[in-house]
Image: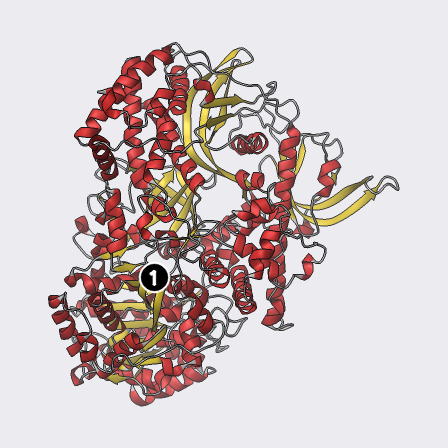
Amino acid sequence: MDDLFDGIDFSAIDAMEKDAMEETSETKRICLTPTLPRRPTMVYGKVREVNQRMHSEEPNDYDVVIRLAVFIPGQKAYLDTAVVKAEEDEEFEVVLQDEWKTTMVQSDDRVNVVLFTPSTRPNHACVSNKNDNYLIVFPDVLFTATSIASSYCCLRRSLLSNFIRSYQESKYSLFGRIRHDLFEYASSLIHQREIVTSSPQARTARLVQTLHTKILGLLKDNIEPFYANSIDIREVYEGLHASIPGIIQWFYLCFQSISHQNDSGVQLRFDQKEVSIEAIEATEETLWCPEWGLKGVLDTVCDVQWNGQKRKIPVEIKTGSEDPISHTVQLLLYSVILAQFNEEMEFPLIHNGTFSGCLIYLKSDSFALPERREDECYEEIKNELTAGKRGPYISQLLLAVKKKADAVTHHLSTASALQIREKPMKTDHCRSMLIRRNLLASYAEKEKRRVKKQIQQLENKECEIEDLFETPILPAVCSNSFYCEKCPTLSFCALLSRMPRSASEDGIEPVSNPVIQRVSEEIAESSLQYFTRWFSLIQIERAVASRQNHDCFWRMSSMKRQNDGETALQAKLLFTEDCSRFKSHHRHTFSDVCVPCCGFRGSFCCFELIPSTPSPEQAALRARLLTAFAESDSVIISTRDGRWAIGYATVTAVLTGDNLPSFQSQAELPSLSDAVSSDPRVWLFVSSSSFTLPYHHSPLHQFFRIDKYKSIDTSLIAVNNLAAFAAHIQASASTAPSQDTFFSQRGVDLNQNNTQMTYPALKRLREILIEGKPPRMACHYRSMEALLNDCPNTHSSLLRAVRALVSRCNADQTAAILHCFNSEDVAIVQGLPGTGKTTIITIIVLISVLKNQRVLLSSHTHTAIDNVLIKLLPYHLPILRLGDYSRLHPSVRQFHLSQRWSGSFDEYVSIMNDSLIVGATVYTSVAQFPRGVVFDRCIIDEAGQITEPSTLQVMLLSHKTLLVGDSMQLPPLVQSNNLIDGGLSESLLSRLEKAFPECAARLCIQYRMNKGIMALTNHLIYNHCLSSASTQLDSAVLTLSLPPSIPNWVATTLLPQHYVVFVNTDSCWGEKNHEIPSAVSSSHQNPFEAKIVENLVTQMVAGEMECADIGVISPYSAQVACLSTCLWKYCKLHKPHGRQRDSCFLEVSTVDRFQGRDKDCIIISLVRSNVEQNIGVLLKDWRRINVAFTRAKKKLILIGSESTFQNSAIWMKCMKYLHRECVVVNVREEDVC
């Protein structure tokens, strides 16, 4: 039997039979003499003044004296409560000596003084090498221990991650990550009954078999990065097996301590004293520590007993070569973070303190493939492995594994104790690391202040935008070219080095680096100018929108974030369920609600969001919480005692009702005594892949804090696109090295740094976008018949279906389709509202498939992509849908990779290479796209809402691009548009349409609105360009049966023949009619208008109109919350057993979220009503007005104060038209209340 498997690599198992097992897995224990735990005092404040105190005439004989305005003195610094003014607070003096006086600190800096050695003088502290005090600059800026350690190689690279996201994962980091997963899985096996209760021989055999099965699962789970990086599956398989000896050694080290059995003979000792591992408390635990300005993900946290003391220690797994300094200090900083949250732990930063931790090196540096046997048996085993399933040959392999395991057990039982090398720990290392961390934070904050100053200059009109195009504040380029050669941000760093220098960088001397110089010289000057402009605009936009970033967790009060709809301070956990037992995506079903889960292998939780304000404001805050979170929002879950980010989660549903839903998995849940029966209650359902509940007992009924955050910073993706567009050098086929891997048939394009995509249209796109050359148009097809006749007759049934669709197209649509296929590079289709943009995209995709062309379908939202794919469902085409499974429409989830792929590696390659249609948003990671596959055409829907840098990635992946949208509707959603004309708020579609109008086709025949609504839009926006598709559409009206007893104003408003109605609230002038600032945000609301909407909706529903046909929208989110409260009985309430569709409920939303949608009846609450005639910024945007009006198909109802809109030109034009052509209804207070 053994001879049969000589070609299989058993080195991993054979290694366990050797006596030198200690060389495979080395465990180091770093300790000093234990003392009683000491907790620091922390003083958080803002710097008022920085001075030097000279002691002599020697240049370095001085101290730095800092005077602080104290925010929070005390044991713990809850930074989110620091909202008092600095000049009103107590002053604190800090003296910096020795290494600390080099710290970059200036006025207005935020600092945290950590005092282990308090001064005898009041309000005074000294931070030096001689005591145990520390200064943390900008503690709200969190850095990982890994980034701090790596900054010693290149300080600049550690900061570049603030600007750009690199998609590529190197081969070695990928290996390391998978080994981490395997190690943590082995740690979890310690608590599995089947393994721990076995005999020693059976236990080891089961361990080897279980780890082998896990390896196959890891290969499947990580198939995408393997594919993206052209990594040989065999190489990874052998490398993971080579890690098994060290992993089993760790298992026995933990097992013998936890189970109090020592049948393996493996021991852990230090100073001749045994160290006992009591429990593995957590794996992959996320910890944020704003007190120290640190964060990290701890591989493992163990409870140990040593020298008669119990303590927690961090355990770090290292899969590469040993780095004594950086690895040890990284572990030290993790110990600092862990000590901050565990009062029984000693801080490792004090002299004569204790530092405990383990560094485990899984040494298996060789990933060389074994000699291959050309016998049939080897090929069969390989095929079964690549198919990811257990067949007869794998079964024989496992028998051989068991034989090997029996021998391994014998050697483990006689193995000597682990050899632990004592390494004394120096607190100088940690001091140096914290000073390094302060340097990184100072650079990051200086850059933020530079951009903030630019914004102030723009607001005060002190300069032009072109004057602000300069490089960000960064350290000088690294002088060691060795680190630059394989840096993933090399091109980006070279671009920054050629940008105009910032005035703040005058003191930084440029460093000559031959690698940077070589790369930068290859970048054309025009490309550099293009990059400089857009990069600078992106940084200004990021600064304007910085309040949405999660660093505001520390710099905004909790109540302020809750009032802004960013936080739920009191989220009570009602239910949690482990999803690891599910094999695929699933649904959680309760007695009256069915909620889809975002995924599996995680936790599913239900929270009730409870207002945390005084009772007079509870109703307003409850309404705010109802709309604060939406499905697919990313959230961070924290405890209320300062334990931040215990889990990342995705919102799967937000439900409301008057009764608590009963959960089948839980027998009884107590009702809340403080619940008000007249108000709806809000429940938030989330799915989390990493949610560690910090309670030893049941976490149910505990309160948590939930914060919204941006899981994807689109600005980082946009900068990555810019760098690739401006600096990419296309590798020729002759220079690209060949690779013999399972994925080598893809023909990827490689350079010295990493695997890159081939950009077929790079040169032509640079000519159009940078040099301003017009797109090229040809005359390949003059008619649809010529176009269809050019298609191969291999899909006769599909060709007949396409001919049927084309026969129903109008002249505009036919011209747009021909325009697309006659384009040589970039084409534009300007589609007015309701003109069938989705229809022509569908036809273009079908014709492309007939021509055997690959199509990349993209947009900035999943909804726009799914709308097209739904229309393609009847044709059974090879479609691949990329993206988050939970955010896709249920009808198209069948095309997601998780549904199409059964587990075979060859099948994965086939799916990637053979899918003619790929759907992905413009923000999708480039690594997820089929590598080496060049798309013939990229179609970007809703292109008018996407910033130009965001569109570059998908355009680079194809030969030709089609931009579809309407520049008369909402522009890209940016917050700096009021500062910069023609900046990020101008989409590529709009810019090219203005520059080259001859390259744009226009759709003007609409199929949505009746003649009354279309006439209003034509008059205000489109200059009578819109026309109706039919006379039947012109006269389309609501089907509504109104009872005779309704008020006159309601009857007039809802009369079906009144296409457009304006409900004027000026007749009831008074406080109830006026807008009011939201009690919980900076937005506006108008409860009187909400009451009018409630009256109208109630009568419409009573008139047998479906809620799904009604849309209620407002430009203000506070009014949406108010409307949702009034209309909650008609909104998304309970979905009995999942049978009802979302479309069965009334939809209340903002104008922006309604773009691309339509309803039979649209009711718009304009909100603004004041004597100052101030309508605000939102209602002055005519494109937003256009979107609001054109959502209606049969009836449009506007509710507002006519007198308030007298100062706006477009609204005055609108009011005159409404009085002349439409219906105006004056409503009184007594008519409504």
Task: Look at mark 1 in the image and give the residue it sits on.
Answer: 861
Question: Left or right: 631 with respect to 121?
Answer: left
Q: Front-most of 770 and 164?
A: 770
Question: Left or right: 984 with respect to 823?
Answer: right
Q: Is residue 194 visible?
A: no
Q: Residue at x 11, y 67 (%)?
A: 797
Q: Residue at x 31, y 65 (%)?
A: 936
What is the three-letter code of the residue carrying label 1?
Thr
Quadrant in which residue 171 is drawn = top left
Q: Position of residue 246 (x, y in %)?
A: 41, 23
Figure check: 194 above or below 96: above
Question: Left or right: 1023 with respect to 131?
Answer: left
Q: Position of residue 600 (x, y in %)?
A: 28, 41
Secondary structure under the numbered disc 1 in the rendered image: loop
Q: Residue at x 31, y 59 (%)?
A: 862
| Number of numbered markers | 1
Quarter of the image that includes the N terminus: top left
* Furthest residue toward right: 57
Figure check: 1046 above or below 297: below
Quarter of the image that includes the C terminus: bottom left
Q: Position of residue 606 (x, y in %)?
A: 31, 43
Dot 1 crowding, Cα within 10 Å, few <14, some 14–19, many 20+: some
Figure check: 807 above or below 626: below
Q: Is residue 112 visible?
A: yes
Q: Position of residue 811 (x, y in %)?
A: 23, 83
Q: Front-most of 397 and 544?
A: 397
